[in-house]
Image: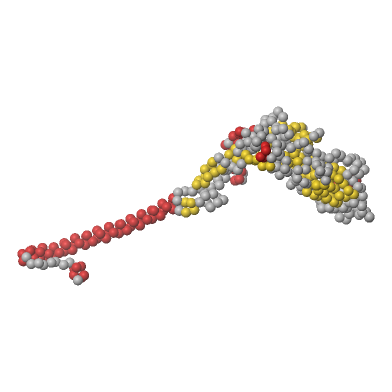
Amino acid sequence: MEKELLPFPLLPWLLLTCFSPFFVHSMELSTSACSSSNISIPYPFGVHGQSPSPAQGFEINCTSSGPRLPIGNNSISILNISLLDGYVTILASAASRSPQCRGNFASFSLEGTNFTFSDTRNKFTAVGCNMVAMLVNGTSGGYSGGCASFCSNNSIVDGACSGVACCQAPVPKGLKKLYSDFTNINITASLSKYTSACAEAFIVEQNSYAFATADLKILNNSNKSPPQYRHVVLEWSIDGGSCEEASRSASYACKENSYCYNSSNGIGYRCNCTNGFQGNPYLQGPGGCQDIDECFLGNPCTHSCINVKGGFNCTCPSGMSGNGRKDGSGCNGIGTLQISIVVGLALLLLLLVFSFWTHCLVKRRKLAKKRQRYFMQNGGVLLKQQMLSRKAPLRIFTSGELDKK
């Protein structure tokens, strides 16, 4: 039976979870969950009776259908909670209808909560014929956005929302209440069989809504039609003013090894772990921001890696220079091995030179002794005796000295 190999990128995480019970324990400390759902509920969200207890304004109810977020008199189904990006995806009917519709229902409001409609992840969408849908600013009463939609039997296409039976516009920053104003556009000749003045405007997650002709049929239905539930993204933040204001308060939510940043919607603030740490920035202790061992999780160094709090250091071998990082200059120059090879070759060369010099010296001495022996064997002793007996100033020259002269 063949063994199935695990993809390499998964190995560090498997090693971390297998050999680091602290990591698993810290994850358990920072989240809660409903038994009827596998949706993770990170602090500051929480369920009453579970640890950690939810922060004010972030209470979640567990039901048989999963976690639900109480907003006003409504209990809204939660699809996902993002701790890092600060948003919640819900299933809701954030819609309003024109007065001509049967089954008109109240506008959707987030006032008095820690939530706003996300301006980057949602679209203001309107479905209807020959009308203009305007988004009313709940504070000033003025308009903060809108779009127009026209109808023609030959131009209505399922899946398209570009101004024919369906139109879309951006959601303004900081929007907490959906209230729409509709204006009919009189056209002399009817271009569509959908002549009803009923129109619906709603906020929906970007790219999650696909227009269908059936949506027009529902609006034109003479019977009272229920609201449609769609994906909506809410941004959340900690109430307490800006980071500068909140940092002076005893209720400041950002814990150790974290930093504060103001909400992009201009309401409240959020926290995040500082670079080199991971975890929940709203919790103190094991469940909070903990140091990442970069050397263990995919060594970022070319040679030696040393983990330090909030980061890591790369070192190069002796004789080499550079930052030692794989994404940097690495280690350059001559290393210990290269130095050893160069020194070894130099010593070998010196040894060869010394050996050659010694060989030449020994050879010269042998030659001198040989010449002395030949001199003695060929009358050298007799010649010296005659020179001494005559007491004459004579000198004996070698063949080499004669060659020089």
Q: Relative to 319, is 64 on the left or the right?
A: right
Q: Quadrant of the C terminus?
A: bottom left
Q: Nearer the viewer, residue 400 or 236?
A: 236
Residue at the spot 64% in from the left edge and 34% down from the top edge: 283
Vertical placement of residue 80 versus 346, above or below: above
Residue at the spot 77% in from the left edge and 36% down from the top edge: 112
The image quadrant that residue 261 belongs to is top right
Q: Nearer the viewer, residue 335 or 139?
A: 139
Instruction: Name the residue at the right extreme.
Output: 188
Residue at the spot 45% in from the left edge and 51% down from the top edge: 319
Q: Nearer the viewer, residue 215 or 70?
A: 70
- The number of numbered badges drawn on the structure is 0
Q: Relative to 232, is 391 on the left or the right?
A: left
Vertical placement of residue 42 versus 350, above or below: above
Q: Position of residue 135 (x, y in %)?
A: 82, 46
Work out whether residue 177 can be spotted: yes
Instruction: Name the residue at the top extreme.
Output: 49
Work out whether residue 38 can be spotted: no
Vertical placement of residue 103 versus 164, above or below: above
Instruction: Name the residue at the left extreme.
Output: 389
Q: Quadrant of the N terminus?
A: top right
Residue at the spot 52% in from the left edge and 46% down from the top edge: 314
Q: Position of residue 365 (x, y in %)?
A: 22, 60
Q: Position of residue 271 (x, y in %)?
A: 66, 39
The image quadrant that residue 240 belongs to is top right
Q: Position of residue 293 (x, y in %)?
A: 56, 41
Q: Nearer the viewer, residue 401 or 181?
A: 181
Colour treatment of the image? secondary structure
